[in-house]
Image (cartoon, rainbow, N blue to C red):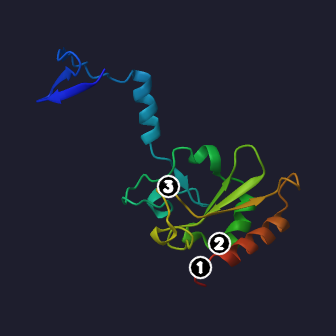
Amino acid sequence: MIATIEDDAFFESSTGKPVEKKEEVKPSKSQERRVEVMKKSITLKNTSGKEVDEEDYFYSTKGEANAAPVYFHDVCGYPVDREDMLAVFDKIFNPKNNFLFYKTKDKEVYIIIVPKKFADTIGAEHDSIDGDFQKHAISFISEGSVNLDTLRMKLLKVAKTIKVLAE
């Protein structure tokens, strides 16, 4: 069936009979909740445990504050909470620069999230899309667990790739 539109009325082309407009379908409550969860912003914390703004880490073409991907915690996990590891991290990356240190949910993989002001791999010049952020991963899967000396060496390698002004 092919329909034509004339002044907001629909007519079937073959017969010329009016076609009824169907009512707008409203989403179910579960669909509304799913959309609400998807719009909900994530909570980011620095190594001091203080909340930081998403807009300082995630690229947005529209300048929106909630640019983080909704699956962020599923992929990147949550902030590292081991004091000994945080002490090593804070010696390499100055806490006042607000680098984030996250651990994936089920593996010995740690992610360093770079603030946009120090990032050199995201932005319009790099064809970034909304939600992009600069991250570096370090893995301890082959070691089985984190050795603080190895952590320090791996963090130093990452730090050399990031241009942070010496303080």
Proximity of marks 1 and 2: CB atoms separated by less than 8 Å: yes
* Residue 116: percent from left, percent from top: 51, 68
Q: Is residue 53 visible?
A: no
In-front residue for pair 24/51: 24
Cα separation, mark 1 vs mark 2, equals 9 Å
- Closer to the chain start, of discs 1 and 3, is 3
Residue situated furthest bottom in the rendering: 166
**Residue behind mark 3:** 131
In the image, what residue occupies the spot 36% across and 24% down? 27
| Image quadrant in which you'd find residue 22 | top left
Q: Is residue 10 left or right of residue 36?
A: left
* Residue 86: percent from left, percent from top: 70, 62
Label 1: state its secondary structure.
loop
Proximity of marks 1 and 3: CB atoms separated by less than 8 Å: no
Cα separation, mark 1 vs mark 3, equals 22 Å
- Closer to the chain start, of discs 2 and 3, is 2
**Residue behind mark 1:** 164
In-front residue for pair 140/132: 132
Q: Quadrant of the N terminus?
A: top left
* Residue 126: percent from left, percent from top: 52, 69
Q: Quadrant of the C terminus?
A: bottom right
Label 2: state its secondary structure.
loop
**Residue behind mark 2:** 93
| Mark toward the viewer: 2 or 3 | 3
* Residue 130: percent from left, percent from top: 46, 56
- Closer to the chain start, of discs 1 and 2, is 2
Instruction: Indicate the amino acid at tag 2.
Output: Phe
